[in-house]
Image: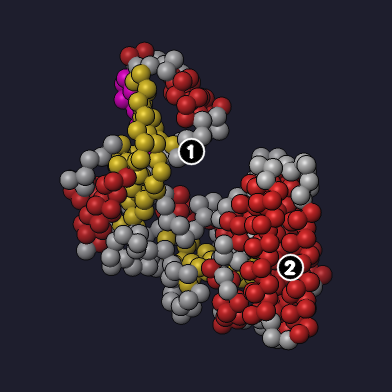
Amino acid sequence: MKILKFGGTSVGSPERMKKLLDIIRPEEKQIVVLSAVSGTTNSLVEISQAYLDGDKRKAKQLTDALHEKYKVFVQELFATEDGKKRGVELITYHFTLIGSLDTELFTPVEEKIVLAQGELLSTALYHFYLAEIGVKSVLLPALDFMKIDEDNEPIVEYIGSHLQTLLDQKAENTLFITQGYICRNAFGEIDNLRRGGSDFTASLIGAAIRADEVQIWTDIDGMHNNDPRVVQGTKPIAQLSFDEAAELAYFGAKILHPQSVFPAQKYKIPVRLLNTMDPAAPGTLITNDSEKGIIKSIAAKDGITAVKIQSSRMLLAYGFLRRVFEVFERYKTPIDMITTSEVAVSLTIDDTKYLAEITKELEDFGTVEVDHDQTIICVVGDFSYNANGFTSSTFSALAKVPIRMISYGGSNYNISLLVKSSDKVEALQSLHKNLFQ
């Protein structure tokens, strides 16, 4: 069985939703995972925020505006009166539910319910559309099998057993449709896998039922060897290892959710990144295999803040780094890069919510310097200790770009460099010219 995930742009209009059948082969055994229609989740976030702010009038205006968009969507998606009637009834139900949350007590629990409506709408609409044109499909509610534990980690065994039960009950069918992103938490409440979680859903399903392959369909033909928005002449990468893909996804390659490859990697399920606009394009295949002796890609992650703690007390001080890390742990702030010397430690974060509190605590250890508007440049490929020349080629390309930090040796697959965000474009273009041209 194959798992096919389609993102928001792939179902972003009735026309695109209809064209999914150019890719989906209903006679083959497969599970189709759909994101919410493009723009829907952003609107639902705004509605939730209005409710949280107590601005019921704004929440109603936003809800009505989104409802109107879906009314148009239904009229364009369905051709028959019966189909349009089912579609109208469906969206009326969901938007009535959103409107019913206009109460004095709107908590994060209700917020998660609102955010789940996008995927519930897209999957049901597509299921109804297939029924209208005579294509048989089964709608599998993700809330019946997708579950996370107290630490917000997915429970793969639970997912596999409950999903397999649902599949066995409909064993005569071949085409199954389910929601990405949404799940239930340890308390049985509606929850989600965070933004971009539809990729994660597909990978989890693939791992849980030991699928033959997971396909992630987006609007770009695979992962490119650089950012095509700022670098000319980029090309799709034919093959990546799971570790290389994870590095690229975390450090800025938007095509893939950073966590999505981990379940597939654990159970050795191949992942393909493919383009709904050009289904014939080969895309990118992600497996356990790593090609030696080549550079694969360059990615950039913006919005980085560098923090430097300098202290003469650090010299030979037992437990100094542990105490520094504990500060970030208390404020649940992940660290991206870290470098150390005998008297200083520099690190980077992308979440500055508690930066003021963190800085205040770190000042107990020594002098603290904070640099905003930084970018991490990540070069991914064969950086194992016996690889020749790639490190020097990387630095040669950046001879005219000031480098704030360097992280090398923590992984065989990448070298990461911190530069000012204003130098990002020059860095990406110089690296591309030096490493690929």
Relative depth, front residue between 262 and 36: 36
Q: Nearer the viewer, mark 1 or mark 2?
A: 2
If the image is split into quadrants, where does the N terminus sit?
bottom right
Task: Judge left or right: residue 392 versus residue 297.
Answer: left
Query: How far across and down, in percent of the image, does residue 318 sit?
Result: 43, 16
Instruction: State the image quarter where residue 220 is shown.
Output: bottom left
As drawn, the label of residue 179 is none
Circle 2 is placed at which residue position? 91
Left of 311 or right of it: where is 108?
A: right
Between 330 and 155, the one lying in front of the other is: 330
Q: Is residue 379 magenta?
A: no
Q: Residues within 10 Å of mark 2 (few under 14, many from 20)?
A: many
Of the pair 404 and 73, the residue shown nearer to us: 73
In-front residue for pair 35/41: 41
The residue under label 1 is: 351
**Segment tinted magenta in the rendering:** 337-344
Q: Residue at x 58, y 74 (%)?
A: 13
Residue for point 73% across, 42% down: 107
User: Which residue is painted at 63% across and 69% down in the image?
Assistant: 69
Residue 205 seen in the figure: no
Expressed as whole percent of the image width and height from the top left, the position of residue 229 reads: 35, 62
Q: N-terminal of the two: label 1 or label 2?
A: 2
Determine the CA span between mark 1 and mark 2.
36 Å
- The residue carrying pointer 1 sits among few (fewer than 14), some (14 to 19) or many (20 or more) residues within 10 Å by Cα, namely some
Vertical comparison of 282 with 145: above or below: below
Residue at the outermost right position: 169
